[in-house]
């Protein structure tokens, strides 16, 4: 891969895809009514019209400093897992994806609980789809057929407190895609995500080494042996 300028940042506008059946599935399984279905359809249509999901990403160069420290474009991060995963890599792709301010501003009125719940699910779906869209785009564009991803905060090993350093990999995030960071390290709009994509042949998924067994969004079975290998 040809190395672009260190600070080269790319912006991608992403289509808003909303599968109403998926939204209904997450609302009240087996307990949705015709009225609720109608409301979900209307909200999904409204959301689809106004949503402008987008992402920033850049081609970055990692350096493993020691077993628990890495650098990306000269910025230091502390993580044993990243140190192991980045050994031997010369290119990684940090990104920030968001549903955008337009959809974020679509809210239910006070007391409209079901509507608010439905919108929450729609926004979650739009963000998940945006992240997947960007990932597939990068795999294709940069010829990375097998990749893995890690977010600041997804594991105790790479805490959310590194979010500020992570955002400093990019310039003018707010001006470009409207994402800001609260003093507590939370991205705004809250339906935004920061993550890093990197080539990985092993099929690594952070959930494999995350001991949070009750997590409802787990994507892979916990593997205590792998946990030891990464975090011993
Ligand atoms: S199990 Fe849940 S908390 Fe742990 S990494 Fe996976 S999604 Fe995140």
Image (cartoon, rainbow, N blue to C red):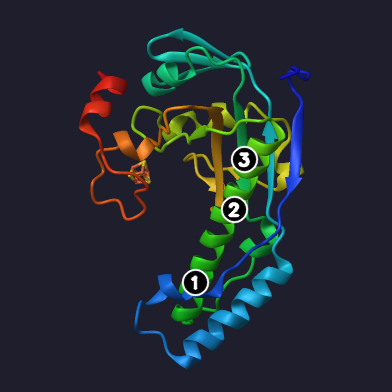
Confirm if mark 1 falls within 8 A of ligand 1: no
| Label 1 CA crowd tier, 10 Å (few <14, some 14–19, many 20+) | many
Q: Position of residue 53 (x, y in %)?
A: 68, 55
In space, the residues marked 1 and 2 are separated at their CA atoms by 20 Å
Q: Quadrant of the C terminus?
A: top left
Q: Earlier in the sequence, mark 3 or mark 2?
A: 3
Between 19 and 127, which is closer to the camera in this rendering?
Answer: 19
Which callout, 1 or 2, points to the residue nearer the camera?
1
Place residue 196 in its image quadrant: top right
Placement of 160 over or under 215, stated as above or below = above
Q: Mark 1: which secondary structure?
A: helix
Between 204 and 119, which is closer to the camera in this rendering?
Answer: 204
State left or right for residue 106 relative to residue 162: right
Q: Position of residue 19 (x, y in %)?
A: 57, 70
State the residue position of label 2. Answer: 189
Q: Mark 3: which secondary structure?
A: strand
Quarter of the render that holds ligand 1: top left
Q: Residue at x 68, y 69 (%)?
A: 48
State left or right for residue 194 relative to residue 67: right
In space, the residues marked 3 and 1 are separated at their CA atoms by 24 Å
**Tag count:** 3
State the residue position of label 1. Answer: 23
Does the residue at mark 3 contact the one at mark 2 (Cβ under 8 Å)? no
Placement of 96 over or under 117, stated as above or below = above
Q: Mark 2: which secondary structure?
A: loop
In space, the residues marked 3 and 2 are separated at their CA atoms by 12 Å
Which callout, 3 or 2, points to the residue nearer the camera?
3
Q: Position of residue 218 (x, y in %)?
A: 34, 49
Q: Residue at x 50, y 75 (%)?
A: 21
State the residue position of label 3. Answer: 96
| Label 3 CA crowd tier, 10 Å (few <14, some 14–19, many 20+) | many
């Amino acid at each position: 891969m040809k190395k672009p300028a260190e600070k080269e940042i790319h912006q991608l506008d992403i289509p808003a895809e909303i599968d109403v059946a998926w939204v209904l599935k997450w609302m009240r399984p087996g307990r949705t009514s015709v009225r609720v279905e109608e409301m979900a359809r209307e909200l999904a249509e409204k959301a689809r019209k106004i949503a402008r999901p987008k992402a920033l990403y850049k081609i970055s160069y990692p350096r493993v400093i020691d077993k628990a420290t890495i650098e990306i474009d000269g910025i230091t991060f502390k993580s044993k897992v990243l140190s192991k995963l980045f050994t031997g890599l010369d290119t990684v792709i940090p990104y920030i994806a968001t549903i955008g301010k337009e959809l974020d501003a679509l809210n239910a009125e006070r007391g409209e609980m079901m509507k608010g719940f439905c919108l929450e699910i729609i926004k979650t779906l739009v963000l998940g789809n945006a992240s997947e869209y960007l990932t597939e785009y990068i795999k294709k564009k940069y010829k990375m057929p097998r990749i893995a991803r890690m977010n600041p905060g997804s594991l105790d090993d790479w805490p959310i407190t590194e979010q500020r350093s992570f955002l400093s990999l990019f310039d003018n995030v707010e001006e470009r895609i409207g994402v800001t960071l609260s003093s507590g390290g939370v991205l705004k709009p809250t339906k935004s995500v920061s993550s890093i994509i990197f080539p990985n042949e092993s099929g690594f998924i952070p959930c494999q080494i995350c001991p949070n067994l009750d997590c409802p969004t787990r994507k892979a079975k916990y593997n205590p042996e792998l946990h030891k290998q990464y975090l011993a």
